[in-house]
Amino acid sequence: MFIEPYHHQHQLNGKKAGWIEVVCGSMFSGKTEELIRRLNRARIAKQKVEIFKPSIDTRYHDEDIVSHNASSIRSTPIHSSEIMLSLAGDCDVVGVDEAQFFDNGIVEVVNTLAFNGKRVIVAGLDMDFQGIPFGPMPALMAIAEYITKVHAVCMVCGDVANYSYRKTAAQEQVMLGETDSYEARCRKCFHS
Ligand SMILES: [Zn+2]
């Protein structure tokens, strides 16, 4: 389990320095649950939390991050990562779900938020259904202080799974609302 770092002694230009955490993994790996766990714990400690997701992801409810186990948390759907800078305001913690769907500008945005003293927690798919690094996720992982890769269970052999295998022939990278079309697979079963 990820243990939150003690960072508050760090100063940057005379103010508290923030940092970036990335939670990544395949589908069914529990990355959104892990994001929600961290955000809820911050909220219990009376820290001000803002949560964003790309407005492209409307699988469940528009205003909620909803993970597959139905624990949910209110979030703001946005079209462009830049909007986070104006909406994050005076909050202490910024959560981002489904970060793989954002534009590459998100890298600069989360850097700016961290420089401004915020703890930024970014969750997303690290690979698409072809096993290719997904959107801005590789760059986000490179600039983050902390990375947690969570795993699913291979639905074929029960081994540790890090791939999202698509069971249909569709070729587009983004196929929303179709979790039934995927299964988590290990390296061996993904490539066979
Ligand atoms: Zn397997």
Image (cartoon, helix red, strand yellow):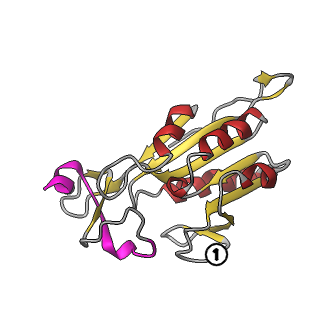
Asked if residue 106 lies left or right of residue 182, the reply is right
Q: Is residue 178 above or below residue 17?
A: below
- The question of residue 186 being in magenta is answered with yes
* Label 1 crowd (10 A; few <14 / some 14-19 / many >=20): some
Local secondary structure at mark 1: loop
Residue depicted at 43% across the width and 44% down the height: 149
Screen quadrant of the C terminus: bottom left
- The question of residue 48 being in magenta is answered with no
Q: Which residue is mark 1?
A: 62
Image spot of residue 138 (x, y percent):
46, 40
> Amino acid type of disc 1?
Asp
Q: Is mark 1 within 8 Å of ligand 1?
A: no
For the residue pair 159 and 141, the one nearer the viewer reads as: 141
Asked if residue 24 lies left or right of residue 16, the reply is left
Residue depicted at 70% across the width and 51% down the height: 82
Q: Is residue 152 above or below residue 108?
A: below
Q: Is residue 35 above or below residue 143?
A: below
Image spot of residue 65 (x, y percent):
61, 67
Image spot of residue 120 (x, y percent):
67, 43
Magenta stretch in the rendered image = 176-192
Asked if residue 41 lies left or right of residue 45, the reply is left
